[in-house]
Amino acid sequence: MAWIKGKSFIKISYLLILAALIAVVAAAGFDTLRTVAFRISSGFFYPYLSLPASGKYEIADRSLLLHSRNELAAALEKQQKVNRALSAKAAVVAELAVENEELRSLLKLKARPNYSYIAAEIILRDPVNWQEGFVIGKGKAEGVKKGTPVLCFSNGDSNHPIMAGIVKNVSNHSAQVTSVISPHFRISAYLTGNKAYGFLNVDEQQRREPGKINISYLPVAHKYKTGQRCVTTGFERKIPAGIDIGKVSEIITPDTVFDNNLYKTGMIEPMVNLESIHFVLLPVFTGKGQKKER
């Protein structure tokens, strides 16, 4: 009797193990079976499912045959006008989004002591030498002064203002700006890292490269490397110190007896992208000791 009970227990155990194996195999093959079933059913039912859609397109295509060529041409021209209008609106919206981001950056800039900020829009560019300057829509009536620095922002970062130029001439409601790329952009500069001072665009004999800023009168004893930041010194009364101008792209060492062996010259890659800016910020000096402009 005990032997029969033991034999029954073994059979039950085998059955349970077999059931567990079947469950594991079924679970593992479920995704595969489902994929195969989907492909088979999709292939079988596709002609029936696609029939209403194909019939709809066939009717639409045949309805076009009922119209004359002139009617179709007029409808096409009308649709093209609508598409052009929508494209123009999309372009305007995209440009407004960029300008909105620039304005947000202008508003977030932290105030500096002895300076007040004026935001201005670029209203005119020189079609020939457009990278060397532009005109902004603010002037004397709004507080703009000659020699005021013109700033923008690097990638919309309101904590990182960069130099775009300097106000050259001012009228009542507009001002002409000389950009950092212009050979007439002349200020002192400071290279971070080795604490070297120099001057921008003052050496008429130095070769020029398009899109670069010349720097000269760098101490020959200092060691320089590409990528050094070039910033404003603060020596000019109206220009705050520490504003980024660009980065060193090349240092030229004197190599002939006719060169000035006391100083080095170099090239600065400006940080500003003049093609992408629409609005600028002018920090106007309001501190004591400033001479009254005539």
Image: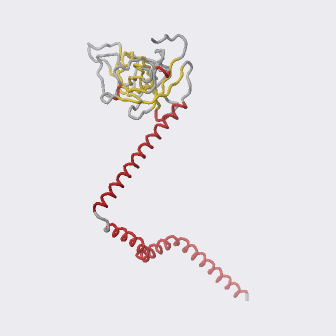
Coloring scheme used: secondary structure
- Residue 69, relative to residue 135: is it above or below? below
Q: Residue at x 40, y 70 (%)?
A: 56
- Residue 199, relative to residue 247: is it above or below? above
Q: Residue at x 35, y 68 (%)?
A: 63
188 sits to left or right of 12: left
The x and y percentages for residue 78 are: 35, 54
150 and 213: which one is in front? 150
Q: Which residue of the protein is positioned furthest toward the bottom in this rendering?
A: 1
36 and 83: which one is in front? 83
Q: Residue at x 69, y 84 (%)?
A: 6
Q: Which residue of the protein is positioned furthest toward the right in this rendering?
A: 1
Quadrant of the snapshot with the C terminus: top left
112 and 83: which one is in front? 83
223 and 91: which one is in front? 91
Q: Quadrant of residue 245?
A: top left
Quadrant of the snapshot with the N terminus: bottom right
Number of marks: 0
The x and y percentages for residue 167 are: 42, 21
The x and y percentages for residue 149 are: 45, 22
The x and y percentages for residue 232 are: 45, 20
Q: Quadrant of residue 183?
A: top left
